[in-house]
């Protein structure tokens, strides 16, 4: 004969396992139309959702060129191309919007119990249409987030995202600054490290000395610290026994004249024409990184490198890279893009060599 207390314990265990199985069957989707750095700033939110809700998975719908490397290296379980479905339909005027049986839009969202979108705006036709589309297949929470607070703020955007989602999602407890933005969020694989060593070797870097990667570019010219400052840092780091590599992306190759690029190559090895996955590979072999307010700086920080980021006109409090070892250097805007700053160089070198 089973005693009542034993019976109650068994039923409690069954209910708990059932609830856990239900949570694990739930998936969340984050929709983001932004570039490399913007998408990386959503990783603390993805980690927070996964840990707090015990979700079976968190997927990301974005531009694949920027997020294709995420699965297996981040908390994102799968990535989907934002261009693979007709997202433009969701911007149709709400009273004219229509989805039919087996509509690709309905099928695209049917697996998710929670959708957080950085595309569209609150109380818009987009929000109404997305919510209607999702509810054609299941009951789910749909949350529209803006990329930054509407009012002036110095709260970091990663914390802002977590706080806003908890305000709008009944499934979540009140957020109390349980930020994951100081953790390593991108973890390279052994294959990345092998590929990184291969790329470095091909570029002339074959020693076992510690490596610092310098990236003098950014999407906006006004965010680019004068390149001669990077040359000065490179020379000092070499004299201190470090290997130094300077990384140039397509924007920098187009922006810098060939004579300057040749001058850079005379000072340090320069790596060009890397895919984003190759950038991950090179950074996986480095101990430190120096760069501007750029997507690559965000990537280096998220990978846990000692990251020195130079900010000019941008608000570093809101947009500094997320990671466990980030130091921000705020420079004066006047002369930022075209003048030597020996004082700031010394500060960065002090951080790297401490």
Image: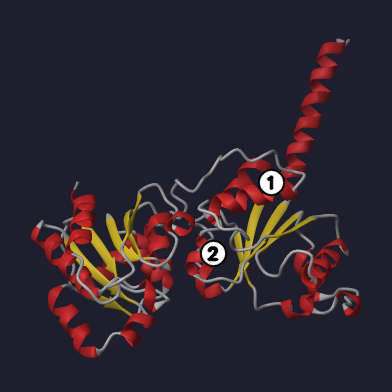
Q: Position of residue 108 (x, y in %)?
A: 75, 69
Q: Residue at x 77, y 43 (%)?
A: 22
Q: Considering depth in this image, is 67 or 217 the residue closer to the camera?
A: 217
Helix, strand or loop status at disc 1:
helix
Q: Quadrant of residue 143?
A: bottom right
Q: Which mark is residue 39?
A: 2
Toward the front, the furthest residue is 334
Q: Residue at x 80, y 29 (%)?
A: 14
Say whether residue 294 is left or right of residue 247.
right
Label 2 or label 1, whichever lies nearer to me, is: 1
Q: Quadrant of the N terminus?
A: top right
Q: Residues within 10 Å of mark 1 (few under 14, many from 20)?
A: some
Which one is earlier in the sequence, the residue at label 2 or at label 1? 2
Q: Residue at x 83, y 12 (%)?
A: 5
Say whether residue 326 is left or right of residue 92.
left
Q: Which mark is residue 60?
A: none
Q: Position of residue 29 (x, y in %)?
A: 68, 59
Q: Position of residue 18 (x, y in %)?
A: 79, 36
Say whether residue 266 is left or right of residue 16.
left
> Does 102 appear above or below 152?
below
Toward the bottom, the furthest residue is 258
User: Are circles 2 and 1 on residues that touch, CB within 8 Å?
Assistant: no
Q: In the rendered picture of this protein, how many numbered marks are placed on residues?
A: 2
Q: Quadrant of residue 202?
A: bottom left
Q: Position of residue 145 (x, y in %)?
A: 67, 60
From the image, tell me which residue sits under label 1. Answer: 166
Helix, strand or loop status at disc 2:
helix
Q: Considering depth in this image, is 304 or 152 the residue closer to the camera?
A: 152
């Amino acid at each position: 004969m089973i005693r009542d207390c034993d019976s109650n314990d068994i039923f409690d265990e069954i209910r708990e396992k059932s609830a856990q199985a239900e949570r694990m069957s739930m998936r969340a989707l984050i929709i983001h139309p932004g570039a490399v750095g913007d998408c990386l700033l959503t990783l603390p939110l993805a980690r927070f959702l996964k840990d707090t809700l015990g979700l079976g998975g968190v997927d990301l719908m974005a531009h694949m060129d920027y997020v294709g490397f995420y699965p297996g290296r981040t908390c994102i379980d799968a990535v989907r191309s934002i261009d693979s479905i007709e997202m433009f339909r969701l911007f149709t005027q709400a009273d004219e919007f229509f989805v039919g049986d087996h509509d690709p839009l309905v099928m695209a969202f049917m697996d998710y119990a929670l959708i957080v979108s950085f595309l569209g705006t609150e109380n818009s036709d987009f929000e109404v249409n997305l919510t209607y589309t999702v509810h054609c297949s299941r009951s789910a929470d749909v949350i529209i987030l803006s990329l930054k607070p509407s009012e002036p703020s110095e709260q970091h955007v990663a914390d802002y995202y977590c706080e806003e989602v908890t305000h709008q999602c009944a499934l979540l407890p009140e957020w109390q600054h349980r930020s994951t933005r100081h953790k390593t969020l991108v973890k390279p694989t052994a294959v990345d490290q092998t590929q990184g060593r291969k790329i470095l070797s091909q570029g002339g870097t074959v020693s076992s000395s510690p490596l610092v990667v310098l990236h003098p570019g950014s999407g906006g010219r006004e965010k680019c610290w004068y390149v001669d400052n990077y040359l000065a840092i490179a020379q000092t780091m070499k004299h201190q026994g470090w290997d130094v590599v300077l990384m140039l992306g397509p924007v920098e190759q187009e922006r810098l004249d060939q004579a300057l690029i040749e001058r850079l190559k005379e000072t340090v090895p320069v790596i060009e024409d890397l895919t984003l996955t190759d950038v991950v590979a090179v950074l996986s072999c480095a101990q430190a990184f120096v760069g501007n307010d750029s997507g690559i700086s965000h990537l280096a920080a998220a990978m846990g490198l000692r990251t020195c980021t130079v900010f000019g006109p941008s608000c570093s409090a809101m947009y500094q890279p997320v990671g466990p070892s980030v130091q921000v250097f705020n420079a004066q805007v006047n002369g930022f893009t075209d003048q030597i700053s020996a004082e700031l160089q010394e500060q960065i070198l002090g951080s790297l060599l401490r």
